């Protein structure tokens, strides 16, 4: 999943970046309100980790901007040294999904991100069953009859994102954004998404029929389950 860290403390941002990258997330970083607003305007994110005390403004302003944008589904976790109850309440009332006061445990941050994903997609656990395949969103594995299917990081991310958004047409641009990150750095003429999807389908079809994994011509892909 695609994460934006909005944090001016370089050491903390790097620590969170390295941890989440190791866990398989695609991570971007903004140190100022201006930089963050520019990134949010261009890209959609699965998670925004938002510090409130930015050098050029208040993180609450970014939260208000984000919640005022139509059709945005970015989950926001506020990360701040502010421990006052009023700040926590204000953040949650303005649309933040969760709140962590600094210093915090990286494992707790990850657990809260998984919990938000489960709530957002109405999952009862970290396991998703798809026609006999089992996806574990925490361990980032796909198995069939307890046999692990060997997928690359990007193949897993594509399959996971499509399954989480089942029965919806996901455009190639949207898929690229959530799996690879900043769309401005991607060559829009490249067919690399189709190549990854082709390889993913080949691996899955070795175990079960995949007629439910559709290509929507000129748009993208849809998983009907």
Image (tube, grey):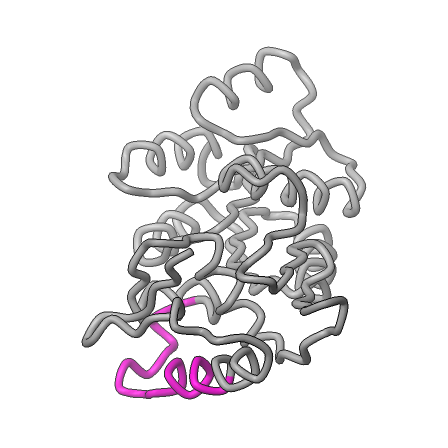
Work out which quarter of the rendered image holds the N terminus and state it. bottom right
Please give the name of the residue rendered at 63% of the width and 37% of the height, measured from the top-left corner: 124
Say above or below: 69 vs 19. above
Q: Residue furthest left?
A: 218
The reply, left or right, for residue 124 in relation to residue 1 is right
Measured as percent of width and height from the top left, residue 127 is found at 66, 51
Magenta-span inclusion, residue 197: yes
Please give the name of the residue rendered at 44% of the width and 26% of the height, measured from the top-left corner: 95
Please give the name of the residue rendered at 31% of the width and 51% of the height, measured from the top-left corner: 41
Looking at the picture, tell me which residue is in the foreground, 36 or 219: 219
Please give the name of the residue rendered at 50% of the width and 86% of the height, measured from the top-left corner: 202
Measured as percent of width and height from the top left, residue 185 is found at 38, 76
Looking at the picture, tell me which residue is in the foreground, 161 or 110: 161
Say above or below: 124 vs 177. above
Say above or below: 170 vs 13. below
Magenta-span inclusion, residue 50: no
Count of numbered marks: 0
Residue 167 falls in image quadrant:
bottom left
Measured as percent of width and height from the top left, residue 30 is found at 51, 54
Measured as percent of width and height from the top left, residue 117 is found at 56, 43
The reply, left or right, for residue 160 in relation to residue 216 is right
Question: Where are the magenta residues, as a range?
Answer: 182-199
């Amino acid at each position: 999943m695609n994460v934006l860290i909005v944090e001016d403390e370089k050491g903390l941002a790097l620590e969170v970046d390295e941890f989440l990258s190791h866990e398989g997330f695609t991570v971007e970083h903004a140190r100022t309100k201006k930089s963050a607003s520019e990134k949010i305007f261009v890209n959609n994110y699965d998670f925004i980790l938002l510090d409130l005390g930015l050098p050029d403004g208040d993180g609450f302003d970014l939260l208000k901007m984000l919640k005022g944008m139509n059709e945005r589904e970015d989950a926001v976790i506020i990360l701040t040294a502010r421990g006052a109850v009023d700040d926590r309440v204000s953040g949650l009332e303005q649309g933040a999904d969760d709140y962590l006061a600094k210093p915090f445990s990286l494992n707790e941050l990850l657990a809260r991100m998984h919990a938000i994903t489960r709530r957002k997609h109405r999952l009862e656990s970290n396991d998703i069953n798809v026609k006999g395949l089992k996806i574990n969103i925490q361990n980032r594995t796909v198995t069939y009859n307890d046999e692990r299917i060997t997928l690359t990081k990007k193949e897993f991310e594509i399959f996971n994102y499509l399954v989480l958004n089942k029965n919806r047409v996901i455009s190639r641009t949207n898929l690229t954004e959530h799996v690879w990150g900043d769309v401005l750095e991607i060559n829009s003429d490249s067919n690399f998404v189709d190549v990854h999807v082709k390889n993913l389908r080949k691996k899955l079809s070795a175990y079960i029929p995949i007629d439910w994994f559709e290509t929507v011509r000129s748009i993208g892909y849809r998983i009907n389950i």
